[in-house]
Image (cartoon, grey):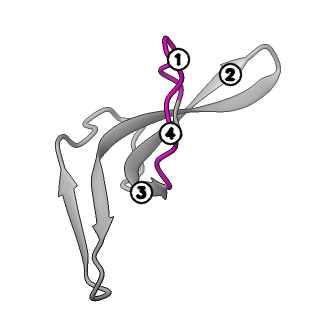
Amino acid sequence: FNVCAGKKYMKGNEEKTQWIKVGDMTVWDDGGISQQLNCLPTGSWWDGKLSVFEEKEQQSGNDNLPM
């Protein structure tokens, strides 16, 4: 799974979310879960929440999350 922080932004009159990948989460066969964070957002926009998304196959040239 991908661990991401959501950064809100405006596109015209619509609020959107940019997902910034900050780490990975693994669910093991025995039911255990481990999480590795590679970085933490430090901007004033970050509310301390992280979201987890199932990793999907990434298309070539497309860096949009969630993956």
Residue that carries the numbered disc 1 in the rendered image: 62
Distance (Cα) linking label 2 and label 1: 21 Å
Distance (Cα) linking label 2 and label 4: 22 Å
Distance (Cα) linking label 2 and label 3: 20 Å
Tag shown at residue 67:
4
Q: Which mark is nearer the camera, 3 or 1?
A: 1
In percent of the image, x 50 and y 53: which residue is there? 53
Instruction: Give the residue at the far right of this rendering.
Output: 13
Query: Could you tell which of marks 2 and 3 lies nearer the N-terminus?
Result: 2
- The kind of secondary structure element at disc 4 is loop
Distance (Cα) linking label 1 and label 4: 10 Å
User: What's the residue type where badge 1 is placed?
Assistant: Asn
Tag shown at residue 33:
none
Query: Could you tell which of marks 1 and 4 lies nearer the N-terminus?
Result: 1
Residue 34 drawn at (x, y percent): 22, 70
Tag shown at residue 49:
3
User: What's the residue type where badge 3 is placed?
Assistant: Lys
> Against 18, is 35 above or below?
below
Q: In the rendered image, which quarter is residue 42 located in?
A: top left
- Give, as a single range, the part of the protein colored magenta: 54-64
Distance (Cα) linking label 3 and label 1: 25 Å
Residue that carries the numbered disc 2 in the rendered image: 10
User: What's the residue type where badge 2 is placed?
Assistant: Met
